[in-house]
Image: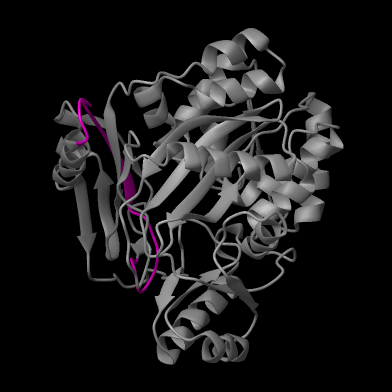
Amino acid sequence: MRKGYKIQEDHIETLGRLVDEIHLWTGIQEAIYDPRFKYVHIISEEDDENLVEEIYKVAKEYGVTNFVTFQETDIILTAKINNLFHNDFVSIQAACISRDKSKQREFMTKHALPTPFYFKVNTINEAVKVANKIGYPFILKPTLAASSSNVSLVNNERQLVDAFRKIELLFKSRKGFYYNTSSQSLALIEEFLPGDEVTVDGVVVNGEFYLGGIHHKKRMDGPYFEEDEYTLPYIDKEEVEIISIVKQICKHLSIKETLFNAELRKDSNGQFKIVEFSVRISGGHVYRNIRDVYGIDLVASHISSLFSDQEGIKLFLRRTNIPKASTCIKFVYREGLIVTNNVGEAKNSPYFRSYYPVASPGEFISCAPKGFDIVGLLSVRYKYNCPEDLAEVINISKTLENKLDLNISSVVKEGTSIGF
């Protein structure tokens, strides 16, 4: 994973229990000292095609033949390398569709899957022409970013121009390995879906999708859509409908062995439409919380399926119908210079589960509308006896957020670099 492996602690811990050696390919230099990995291969090549060949060559030398990623921006690389080893877990085409929202919209239209209406745009002039045709409001989003970065609800032309320029800056910055030569378009204009949103995580074993969990997400009405308050268990009546939609996606992608994530949101008529999907599961605490609530182990079952371990598949796919707990993931956002970012007194609570600091001391971060940086991810766990417990676990997460050792300065010190 070129980036982001630091918030995949639970995923990596599971890998360590099930395989003899873990090799990490990353651009993070300090990873070479991480004892969880047998070998750490530092990546310097930026061109994806050259990088595939570089990784393939080194992997053959070390006898590594199976690749997995939990990082959105690496799913095409992973599919291409697995293809060179004749692993047909996920086709390159399916991975490319998953990475590009414009390709996703074409895919869903082709297979009559519920999707918002959309228009591909590459310039501000094109975006303005579409806006004049369909009217406001609508969603503007980059085709290749993740975590709702630079997704905006646009109500007028001034907002459209401002939001589009930010996407252009994201593209030019090459930030986060988001954009590359595979993109069909710079941005999408889409129908605004005003209803509740969920994120679905599961695993595909031998071509069949198995549900891990459906997270409720905090309802965001715009103008920005920062991720927040992921809660389990799912308590609404549409679970069967959601699973059916996700299974149709997996069927038409023809994927065989993979982790899988999809996000859906209700339209003005209360019908779920697909916001996006990917051949990986959510990062951070999602994987652990699904285990805590339902018992199913998505990563362990996936690794078992890659090595055709039928006993492991049977064991790790077991899922309880009665939730064992309620959980909430609180996304922490701030504006300014990070001075300290630690768990603090929050760890003393019996409800505390984990905290991943994402931003580092000395780093300048911004929340919407200036940026979409995440300071940290806080996870809490509570009992579950009734739906009201979900409201309580959210309240607990908000209380513990205030107990984090989080010091943000509004003053940018001399010599500090601010990048996009």
The quarter of the rendered structure image containing the N terminus is: top right
For this rendering, which residue is in front, 162 or 218? Answer: 218
Q: From the viewer's perspective, tell me whether residue 221 is left or right of residue 137.
A: left
Q: Would residue 185 appear left or right of 394 to someone viewing this image? A: right
In which image quadrant can residue 181 be found? bottom right
Q: In this picture, is 113 found above or below 14?
A: below
Residue displayed at 67% across by 21% down:
305
Name the colouring of the figure.
one colour
- Report if residue 15 is visible in the image: no
- Extreme top residue here? 311
Residue found at x 53% / y 92%? 132
On screen, residue 402 versus residue 171, left or right, reads left
**Magenta part of the protein: which range?**
366-387
Q: Quadrant of residue 188?
A: bottom right
Give the x, y percent position of residue 409: 22, 64
Of residue 403 and residue 98, the one placed in the foreground of this image is 98
Q: Where does residue 368 sit, x and y in percent of width and height? A: 34, 69
| Image quadrant in which you'd find residue 168 | bottom right
Q: Position of residue 38 (x, y in %)?
A: 62, 24
Whether residue 24 appears in this view of the structure is yes
Residue 406 percent location from the top left of the image: 21, 50
Residue 379 included in the magenta stretch of the image:
yes
Is residue 340 part of the magenta span, yes or no?
no
Name the residue: 65% across, 15% down: 20
Residue visible at 41% across and 71% down? Answer: 418
Q: Nearer the viewer, residue 268 or 58?
A: 268
Query: Which is the main secondary structure of the residues drawn in magenta?
Result: loop
Residue farthest to the front, as pictured: 269
Is 201 placed left or right of 46 in the picture? left
